[in-house]
Image (cartoon, rainbow, N blue to C red):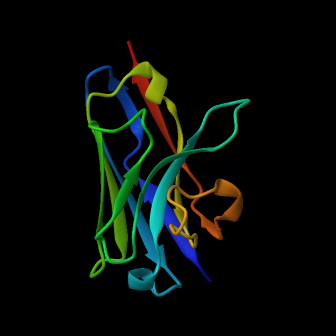
Amino acid sequence: QVQLVESGGGLVQAGGSLRLSCAVSGLAFSSYNMGWFRQTPGKEREFVSAISWSGGSTYYADSVKGRFTISRDNAKNTVYLQMNKLTPEDTAVYFCAAGFSLAAGTPDPRRVRFWGQGTQVTVST
């Protein structure tokens, strides 16, 4: 079956960095657009970043542009999210996502086919 396994979350001070990884199995990784979303209690899951199947196109939420970088290694079936200059507003559970279209730009979380279990990122002041 399809599995998306995130890692790399944790506690970091404001201004610090974290790198999230998502290892994927059970699907043809190099054919899938991949992305990251995040969610805080009581709020809807929101888009953070996405990368096309080829890696040639990347997309970012305005709130993370210039601070976060998404990348993928199709040989390792892994997608990454490098997060720099973290702020307490970045505190959330981060979810890896696969199986969505980028034809209209940023993906709708309601149209994502596959999700990881999530990894907690906490940024302290």
Looking at the rendered image, the quarter that the C terminus falls into is: top left
- Nearer to me, 124 or 79: 79
Residue 69, x across and y down, in percent: 28, 49
Q: Residue at x 52, y 69 (%)?
A: 103
Relative to 26, residue 37 above or below: above
Quick one: 40 or 55, which is closer to the camera?
55
29 vs 65, left or right, is right
Residue 66 lies, with reference to residue 15, above or below; the image says: below
Q: Is residue 17 above or below residue 98?
A: above
The quadrant holding residue 67 is top left
Q: Residue furthest bottom?
A: 28
Going 68% across and 30% down the picture, which residue do you hit? 41
Give left or right: position of 67 versus 124: left
Residue positioned most to the front? 104
Q: Nearer the viewer, residue 31 or 103?
A: 103
Q: Decide: is 37 above or below 114.
A: above
Q: How many marks?
A: 0
Q: Residue at x 39, y 76 (%)?
A: 53
Task: Locate residue 123, reporting x and y percent.
Answer: 41, 24
Q: Name the image quarter holding the N terminus.
A: bottom right
Residue at screen point 38% across, 83% down: 30
Determine whether, in the image, residue 53 is placed left or right of residue 16. Answer: right
Q: Residue 124 lies in what quarter of the image?
A: top left
- Residue 24, image x, y percentages: 45, 73
x%, y% of residue 60? 40, 47
